[in-house]
Amino acid sequence: MNNCYLFEVSWEVCNKVGGIYTVLKSKASHIKAQFKDNYYLIGPYFPDRKVVEFGELPPIPVLKPVFDKLLGKGIICHFGQWLIPSSPTVILIDFSGYLKNTNQLKAWLWEKYRIDSLGSDFYDYDQPIVWGFAVAELIAAFRDFTKSERLIVHCHEWLSAGAALGIKGWNIPAKVVFTTHATVLGRTIAGTRDDFYQIWDNIDADREAYNYRVHTKHLTEKAMARNVDMFTTVSEITGMEAGKFLGRKPDFILPNGLDLSSFPTFEEISIKHKLFKRKIKEFMLYTLFPYYSFNIEESFIFFTASRYEFHGKGLDVFIKALSYVDRALTKEYRSKTIATFFWVPAMDVRGIHPEVLENKTYYEDIKESIVSEIPEIEERLIYRLVANKKITKRDLFSDKSLSDLKKKLKRFKRQGSSPRLCSHIIDEAHDPILNEFRVNNLLNKESNAVKVFLYPIYLTGADGILDLTYYECILGSQFGIFPSYYEPWGYTPVEAASLGSITLTTDLSGFGRHFLNHYRDKANKGIYVLKRYGLSDREFVKELANQLYKFALFSRDTRIDNKIAAKSLSKEFDWSKLVKNYFKVYEALLKH
């Protein structure tokens, strides 16, 4: 691919919105290694927003005349680097001065591609579309000045449609590849119906898009898929969906990877697991132990993490399956406790719940009282041991210290109430997760073997409760459960496995399906992929419950073997292996 220029276009370049941001950021070093200085990432620039990941630089000579030409059209280009280890070259486009052309461009989309954009939302549709056309203007000017005949423009998602459709419709001599990470209509229908895969063969896509009022985005996406030089998706399941809804099957599948060089080794994972598991168990101590106690050493930590897509992410079936496990463990009198965390950011969170905060304050007061006495306790114990004297309660605490601790412990205990199901203040009466907890009798009572916690904020590492980052939470947990119904790819299972967590997903996720297609002989040790395609929710809940119950009975040695297997298998999803699929696409384009 010598003397070839690659422009990768996405609304998420230096602009974190969703999973595409991770795709671009994590593979940038591998793309740059192949294309060297001929690789450019293009994203939006917002004058009123500080771009913290962008380091602006003077434009290089080849771009200066291009930028100058675009100024006359109201397009301001900012040149620089994405402030990540690989430092890829970035062009961020301020299209605010180009917005005056919005109606004209939308009219052209109707005339050329029959895209109905009447009444489209300014922020949700018009802005990215106009930005995309500004990108097409950039590519046209670059081609005029450089005369290069080897230009590849890789557009991600419908938001870059202006670039793809502008280049093809204006006959700009460049090869265009379009990657859809999830179809607009598929995500919409799957989020509202639990029979999506049973009915998708009989869906009239255009009519349903109008029914769901997503027709403008759907028609845009459809026009892109049908008019670009190369159409790709991130998974087999999304490719099947695209064939039905967009009228074109993908030419290539581009599975998503991770840059695993930045992830800890298994030895580092083992050390960090103990540290962060202790912090998570401390959370359990001050949220549960004011009400009752249990053997916390016999507890496992399950988790799921996702956007708040109750059905699409399988949160509904996960809760139902946990209810089965709760009843089974209780019925058999097994001394097991499963603490299950739902790290799912919710809307309208109004701060930490006062009861949780108060419990934590009382707990830390008890902890500080003990920690402050440790040097003296250590000294007394060593003396009693070397002097061969009997160790008594007073050697641990003085009468005054013991009296103070008893008062603090009495204040810590709560009578006549149950632990909270959510760490923060939210609209509990209308929250689907909390309502499903209640319907399935997962109430965090002493009789519940399965404890559940909705943690409805982003894990920043400084939230005032857990104070752990997302990856630190995974490192402290033992099982990551992602029983998705609609999941075009699914980064979370790969991330969890890479961090040594035993991982479960389904064959309806892009990752799960890819894993079964390529590593079926290694499935169900470390990484578990359950069949969900073709099963009803009721049937799948039973399968999921059976597997969760088996997890609860894993011995320590079995858990360690599975963690090692998960970490080892995750290496198959490093970009150093998966980026080759991108290069195959680009090579095919240049021959096309």
Image (cartoon, rainbow, N blue to C red):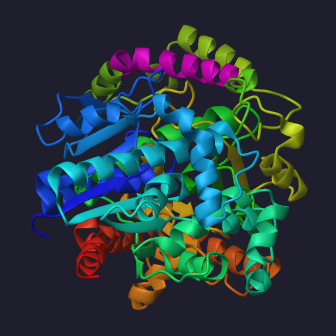
Q: Residue at x 64, y 51 (%)?
A: 107
Left/right of residue 30 with respect to residue 72 in the rendered view: left
The mark total stands at: 0
Quarter of the image for the N terminus: give it.
bottom left
Dividing the picture into quadrants, the one containing residue 371 is: top left
Quarter of the image with the C terminus is bottom left
Q: Is residue 358 magenta?
A: yes
Please state the horizontal and vertical placement of residue 59, each as a whole percent of the image.
Answer: 18, 33
Inspect the magenta stretch and tell me whether residue 74 lies in it: no
Q: Nearer the viewer, residue 421 or 509?
A: 509
Quick one: 60 or 352, which is closer to the camera? Answer: 60
Give residue 67's quadrant in the image: top left
Tell me if residue 224 comes above or below residue 517 in the rendering. Answer: above
Which SS does the magenta portion mostly show? helix
Q: Residue at x 71, y 74 (%)?
A: 545
Q: Identify the residue at horizontal 76%, vertical 28% (top origin).
A: 425
Above or below residue 37? Residue 236 is: below
Q: On the picture, is 443 further left or further right than 487?
A: right
Residue numbers of the magenta segment: 357-377
Asked whether the viewer can see residue 183, the reply is no
